[in-house]
Amino acid sequence: MKGESTLQKHLKSFDRNRTPTGLLVATTDVQRRRRLNSDYEISFTVPMTSTDYKELIIPKGHVQDERGQFYVVQSRARDRSNKVISAQIICTHIMFKMIDSKMPYDDYIDEAYGVHISVLLDKISTATGGIYTFVTHDTFDLRDVKDWGATTALAALQDTVNLYGCEIDPDNFVIHLYKRIGSDDGFEYRIRKNIINDSFKDNVSNLTTRLFSQMKDGRTFIGLSADYLTTEERSLLQSVPGAIVDNKLAVNYLISPYTQYWTNNVNAFYDGELIDQNIEDPEELLIATREALRKKEMPEFEIGVSAADIYKIDPDEQRPGLGDTVYAYDPEMELQRVSCRVMELTEYPFSMDKHSQATLSNYQMRDDTQVLADLERSKQILNDLLSGGRVRAAAFEEFAKQAVIDINASKSEIIYDSRGIVLQEVDHPNVQMVLTSHGLIITEDGGATARTAITGRGIAAEVIAGVLGSFVSMEIGSGNNITKINPSGISAGHADFNSAPFRVDMAGNVVARSITLTGLIEESTMTYSDIIAGTVTGALIRTAAAGARFEVDETGWRTYDASGTRRIGIYQDAGYNMSALTFDQSNGTRSGVINGGDGLFEVRSAGDNDLFLSAMTNTIFFQGQMNFASAYSVSGFGINFVSGLRAELDSIWSALAGKASASHSHTVNLGTHNHGIAGAVNWGGSFTVS
């Protein structure tokens, strides 16, 4: 919704009755995902040791985002990573609680004509006890309704949205319905402004420039007055001889105005077909054909954008909304201000350092949930057919009805020839399914080759897609040159699972004799007996996860004692151009350091620690100049430690004493004396003795 508040810094928590319980301050990675007419979901991570998890987050409780929207806590996935335990919480928008309300049996509509959308919405609102209400902002055409309301309130809403072509914008319990949500404010996703990275994919596999159509019982709009055509449609059809006769349509197709752009010497048209068994009025079929062709006459494209959320730091910046028309500009990606819609938004509303992900497209995308919902409906027809081993008449009638529809839609004819029973496509006679005494084949060249074959020897197919089923064992090869898939797991290289050089058990444990890995290995714990490699590059190498160990990473090398206290470290200090070897005490405080850098090598103790240099009974040699200028004091060092110094001084004093008794002056020039003392002693002058 536009104009939402950005002042809220945390998710708010509520109990099952939506009574406030507090703020979720310990949550991280808060992510909101919204998809047009589909998912509205919030997920986040929370420490299991936090008050948030223990007291504020409860199943079927609620959280509220900064937009004021309520989300229901649906799942909690716990995870342990070493000593950190956390939970991944997933919440869905409160709109989806309608799935808990069953539509009353009396509200079921088998078939009704010209129904206003409000009739169905009122029934859904009543089924929820009036908790959910609906507001329509556009005028929707009347529709014929068939087989509606036999499910939940949420499924009934989805059927209504599909039937009338609505787009929804939920505001908690008030569901707003539009023909098209969002706005066009000229917002741009632009490289070098707000695009961090992007991807662009286009697809012409569904391109259609001539669309045929059928409605119930295989009828068409042939014979309908050409006055129902638009000016453009009439002009295009009049260019085809015999398409309009006596101002009436003589064909059951419409032509795209982009036909000439795509035509070539092989394809004058790219044909498609619309078959809708729920339509009975030719005029309604014409409208449906027009709308379907408009969606298929241009290539489908999808743009993925990771965009900087500039509005988080500048409130005046535009903020794109779900369903908005936006423009993508990245010339090097062939995006020349392409117009598209925001079909999906993944946002991080409480993180300044994470930016939104947007999926932009020019067509209505269906997500896995919607596709699976359709598959589930078809599956349910078959499940309902057999109940307790007995055929249920109502379900069988529904199955038979659906089978007739599917067969009519297939446009196949049955042929009996020398091969057996042949199901042949009417428009493309080379496309056949042939049932013979030896098996079944599916061919696209009239039987010359089989694209798929099922015989007594097995199945041959180019592609087998989907879930194949439950098997006791699958084997490729023989003897010990074999690959197996069985209840033990996957194995290769030996008939016995436990002897196979490659095997994966059901717990995910892998044994392999040799592995060549390329690409990224995500954060993991690996245990090896021997590693032989040219280069090993990693974030952390250590001999144990805790206790006594040594570690190496990009910061340096460290050792730890049994209590986990760091004792020795080697680091590179880029700021001082020095490499440091550090030593720590058992209490974790620094004991001393050896630094080596540009122009200085330093050995230093830390704190109140003494520095002790010892060679026991051997010799410590010093070379170069010794500077004691910064020493507080020098103790334990006497002249007796200098070889010959005592004797030299004694002789000098003896000479001085002998001259002291003389009555005349005498000058003694001591000069430089070197009597076996390591290094010269220069007294620099003379003494005068009287």
Image: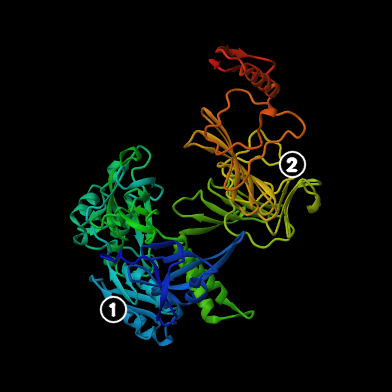
Q: Which residue is identified by label 1? A: 118
Q: Which residue is mark 2?
A: 530
The residue lying at 29 percent from left, 45 percent from top is 193
Residue 31 drawn above or below residue 647: below
Number of callouts: 2
Could you say where residue 482 lies in the image, as x and y percent from the top left? 76, 47
State the SS at label 2.
loop
* Foreground tag (1 vs 2): 2
Q: Check disc 2 and give the amino acid type.
A: Asp
Q: Is residue 96 visible?
A: no
Residue drawn at point x = 29 percent, y = 71 percent:
177
User: Where does the C terminus fall, quadrant-wise?
Assistant: top right
Q: Nearer the viewer, residue 681 or 561?
A: 681
Local secondary structure at mark 1: helix
Residue drawn at (31%, 57%), measured in percent from left and top? 312
Label 1 is placed on what type of residue? Ser
Task: Classify residue 396 as left or right of residue 282.
Answer: right
Viewer-proximal residue among 105 and 571: 571
| Res 231 label | none
What crowding class fits label 1: few (fewer than 14 Cα within 10 Å), some (14-19), or many (20 or more)? few
Marks 1/2: CA distance? 72 Å
**Which of pointers 1 and 2 lies earlier in the amino acid sequence?**
1
Location of residue 60 in the rendering, given as x and y in whole percent from the top left corner: 47, 77
| Residue beneath the point at 46% across and 79% down | 100
- Along the horizontal axis of the image, is 489 left or right of 270? right
Which image quadrant is residue 124 in?
bottom left
Q: Position of residue 104 (x, y in %)?
A: 42, 85
Q: Is residue 605 above or below residue 36?
A: above
Question: In this view of the protein, can residue 89 be seen by the observer?
Answer: yes
Looking at the picture, does residue 241 appear above or below residue 348? above
Category of crowding for the residue at label 2, using alpha-carbon neighbours closer than 10 angstroms: few (below 14), some (14–19), many (at least 20) = few
